[in-house]
Structures are given as structure tokens and as C-alpha cells.
Image: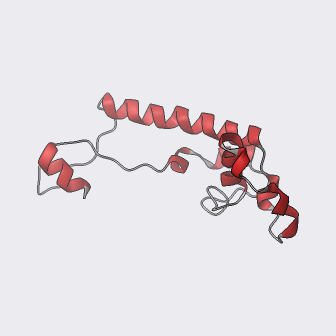
């Protein structure tokens, strides 16, 4: 689909998941339950996502059930940990977008269009 936008509008369209800006060093520093990418970071409904949720919308996190399940990883999450992830994500996505705007990060043009 991105190639259609490029052909029609000549747009520098790129895809970047917010968690892709995080590194193994971030996992090593901030995660307690594991440091494997992509298993532990992002890791669906595990420590990383739970920490983000605790920082952004703690009222929606059902912490009471943590002791009732065999998987302890979500229970290792904290709101400060989530805030640290959010700050890194915002800074790095902002830098990525600025590089796109400045022309330093440009999507490759398919051969049929060049």
C-alpha cells in the first residue's frame, strides 16, 4: 500500500511500531522478568505492556488478579517503569519523525517508480 501513496502523492511513508525504537539495552535496564526481544519486549500483556498501562491508565489494570495466575510477569511491572519506557519511546519516535522531515530518513523508491 505504501508504494501506492508514493506513486500517487510522492510521500515519504514509513511504518514504525512504537516498541521498535526500544533496544536490548532498554530491556536489560528496565525489565525484571526477561530481556529477550521480541518475546519480553514488547511481550503481549506482560511486564512491558502492563508497565505502560500502569503509567497511562492504572484504573484499567486489574492488579487484584496477579496473584491468581501462574504467570508472574505482569506483576513485576510498575508505573515508574512504564513512564521510563514512554519517555524513551516519545523521544525516539520524535527523532525518527524529525529525521524524516529533514530528509535524513527516506523510504526507498521502488525501481518501477524511479
Indicate the position of residue 55 as horizontal and vertical percent values.
Answer: 70, 41
Task: Looking at the picture, tell me which residue is in the foreground, 65 or 89.
Answer: 65
Residue 29 appears left or right of 89: right
Residue 50 appears left or right of 93: right
Q: How many marks?
A: 0
What residue is rendered at 25% in x and 48% in y?
Answer: 108
Task: Looking at the picture, tell me which residue is in the foreground, 94 or 78.
Answer: 78
Residue 34 lies in what quarter of the image?
Answer: bottom right
Residue 110 lies in what quarter of the image?
Answer: bottom left
Residue 33 shows up from this direction: no
Indicate the position of residue 17 as horizontal and vertical percent values.
Answer: 47, 51
Name the colour scheme.
Answer: secondary structure
Q: Is residue 43 above or below residue 16?
A: below
Indicate the position of residue 65 as horizontal and vertical percent values.
Answer: 82, 63
Residue 92 shows up from this direction: yes
Residue 62 appears left or right of 11: right
What residue is rendered at 51% in x and 47% in y?
Answer: 18
Amino acid at each position: 500500500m505504501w508504494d501506492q501513496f508514493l506513486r500517487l502523492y510522492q510521500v515519504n511513508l514509513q511504518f514504525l511500531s512504537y516498541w521498535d525504537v526500544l533496544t536490548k539495552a532498554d530491556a536489560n535496564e528496565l525489565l525484571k522478568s526477561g530481556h529477550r526481544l521480541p518475546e519480553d519486549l514488547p511481550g503481549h500483556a506482560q511486564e512491558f505492556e502492563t508497565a505502560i498501562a500502569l503509567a497511562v491508565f492504572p484504573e484499567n489494570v486489574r492488579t487484584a488478579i496477579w496473584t491468581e495466575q501462574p504467570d508472574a510477569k505482569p506483576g513485576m511491572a510498575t508505573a515508574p517503569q512504564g513512564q521510563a519506557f514512554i519517555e524513551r519511546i516519545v523521544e525516539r519516535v520524535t527523532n525518527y519523525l524529525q529525521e524524516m522531515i529533514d530528509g535524513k530518513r527516506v523510504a526507498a523508491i521502488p525501481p518501477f517508480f524511479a
